[in-house]
Image (cartoon, grey):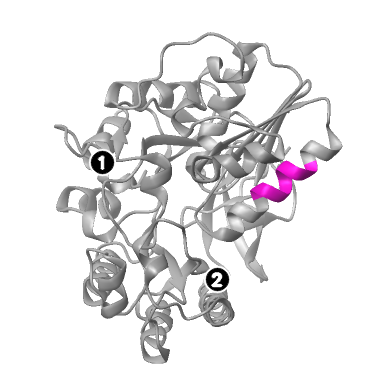
């Protein structure tokens, strides 16, 4: 969850990187509307826990700031509008959350068939750039298509214009994000690989891609991921499970062997690449053997950055009507996945000790990430927003401790 404030405005973002990027558009829209005493919750609905957190935050705001207008937007608001309205909040449609008219001002009429790029604010050294929203696939567990509609992509020219804004304000790393990023450009004459090539014509020093569907990594994108040095050696895959029967029941388009083969190809072509993955534990009908296949996937695919959560039924999805394994089992299995992933990550981080890395320094001057997304804490501060060479001297939990090699750029 992230929060942005100005005067009596407050924008609270829950969930994914796309929401973080879109939160800046919300803040600008609230500004344009002249709405000064307003709290906007940009909600998430990927799990029932995410919805619960949004409800809790809204109730607290209504209690603690009775004079403010409390607005709820985002995926949870889209799916549970009546519930938030009954609480006393005002609901804004997902597609309208970046429009001033949604907060009392005047703006263009909503065109839900298009998508404007969403660029996060200047409060981070890295810029999150949303280039795509919605999803045209039909995974049985996912409510995203219900909350965001079918896939829509921003134009290449519009994305380039937003990237230039980030570069002009000194942000030296851009992270492309979207609900189904790898499907960028579907139905048009462009593709994610073509967009990346266009962005690399700009003076971008570091480009990172958020979660990718393994089935959509074509030859052109594979070459960029493995051969372009300005694309960071960090690939996060939307895997969800490691058992073929569960993948079939999820209606995913890849199978376990496809995933393992893809990771092997990536690591052969670029040995220093770090692998992340989304994984769901306790999907309906998942038995012990099926779960064991997902657990083994962490080692088989060398997953060091896991985004792991227990399955929770989302109303209106096919999976919610399947035989459930129960929340207790799902949570226990998610904990086992997180433990295995944590062990794998720390063993990988131990191999980084003594190496040098290029680090983007965050606004606090003390923390940041290496090219491979390893989290780093500096022994001495450096200028925020700079890219510096560091030596990784030790591991502290899930972070690396580093010293600056070039002392001329310390703060």
Helix, strand or loop under label 2: helix
Q: Position of residue 16 (x, y in %)?
A: 51, 48
Estimate the spatial distance between the alpha carbons at disc 2 and disc 1, rounded to whole Å.
30 Å
**Mark identifier at residue 192:** 1
Q: Residues within 10 Å of mark 1 (few under 14, many from 20)?
A: many
Sequence-wise, the earlier of marks 2 and 1 is 1
At x 25%, y 41%, the residue is: 192
Does the magenta segment cover residue 323?
Answer: no
Up-down: is 139 above or below 26? Answer: below
Does the magenta segment cover residue 58?
Answer: yes
Disc 2 to disc 1: CB gap under 8 Å: no
Taking the image as drawn, is residue 13 in sight?
no
Q: Position of residue 304 (x, y in %)?
A: 48, 70
- Determine whether, in the image, residue 68 is placed left or right of residue 319: right
Residue wearing tag 2: 349
Q: Residues within 10 Å of mark 2 (few under 14, many from 20)?
A: many
Q: Nearer the viewer, residue 273 or 4?
A: 4
Task: Locate residue 77: give its quadrant.
Answer: top right
Q: Position of residue 241 (x, y in %)?
A: 37, 73
User: Which region is colored magenta?
Assistant: 54-60
Report the predominant secondary structure element of the magenta stretch: helix
- Determine whether, in the image, residue 129 is placed left or right of residue 192: right
At x 54%, y 76%, the residue is: 334
How many numbered circles does the render carry? 2
Up-down: is 34 above or below 402? Answer: above
Q: Nearer the viewer, residue 330 or 7?
A: 330
Helix, strand or loop under label 1: helix
Q: Position of residue 331 (x, y in %)?
A: 57, 76
As drawn, which residue projects farthest toward the top?
Answer: 106
Task: Locate residue 13: give its quadrant.
Answer: top right
């Amino acid at each position: 969850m992230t929060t942005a404030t100005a005067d009596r405005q407050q924008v609270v973002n829950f969930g994914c990187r796309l929401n973080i990027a879109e939160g800046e558009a919300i803040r600008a829209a609230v500004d344009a509307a002249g709405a000064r005493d307003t709290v906007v919750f940009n909600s998430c609905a990927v799990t029932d826990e995410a919805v619960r957190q949004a409800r809790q935050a809204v109730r607290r705001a209504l209690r603690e700031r009775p004079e403010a207008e409390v607005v709820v937007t985002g995926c949870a608001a889209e799916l549970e509008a009546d519930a938030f309205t009954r609480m006393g909040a005002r609901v804004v449609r997902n597609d309208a959350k970046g429009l001033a008219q949604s907060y009392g001002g005047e703006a263009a009429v909503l065109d839900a068939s298009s998508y404007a790029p969403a660029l996060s604010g200047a409060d981070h050294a890295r810029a999150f750039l949303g280039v795509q929203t919605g999803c045209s696939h039909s995974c049985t567990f996912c409510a995203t298509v219900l909350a965001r509609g079918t896939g829509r992509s921003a134009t290449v020219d519009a994305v380039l214009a937003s990237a230039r804004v980030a570069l002009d304000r000194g942000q030296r790393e851009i992270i492309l994000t979207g609900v189904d990023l790898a499907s960028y450009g579907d139905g048009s004459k462009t593709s994610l690989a073509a967009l990346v090539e266009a962005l690399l014509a700009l003076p971008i020093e570091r480009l990172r891609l958020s979660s990718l569907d393994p089935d959509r990594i074509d030859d052109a994108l594979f070459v960029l991921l493995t051969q372009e040095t300005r694309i960071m050696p960090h690939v996060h895959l939307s895997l969800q499970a490691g058992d073929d029967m569960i993948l079939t029941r999820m209606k995913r388009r890849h199978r376990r062997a496809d995933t393992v083969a893809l990771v092997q190809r990536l690591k052969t072509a670029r040995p220093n690449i770090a692998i992340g993955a989304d994984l769901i534990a306790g999907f309906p009908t998942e038995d012990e053997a099926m779960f064991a296949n997902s657990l083994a996937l962490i080692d088989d695919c060398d997953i060091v950055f896991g985004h792991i959560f227990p399955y929770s039924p989302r109303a209106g999805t096919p999976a919610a009507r399947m035989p459930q394994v129960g929340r207790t089992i799902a949570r226990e299995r998610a904990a086992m996945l997180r433990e295995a992933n944590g062990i794998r990550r720390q063993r990988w981080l131990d191999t980084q000790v003594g190496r040098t890395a290029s680090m983007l320094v965050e606004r606090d001057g003390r923390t940041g990430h290496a090219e491979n997304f390893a989290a780093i804490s500096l022994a001495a501060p450096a200028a925020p927003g700079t890219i510096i060479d560091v030596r990784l001297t030790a591991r502290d939990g899930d972070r690396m401790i580093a010293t600056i090699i070039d002392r001329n750029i310390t703060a």
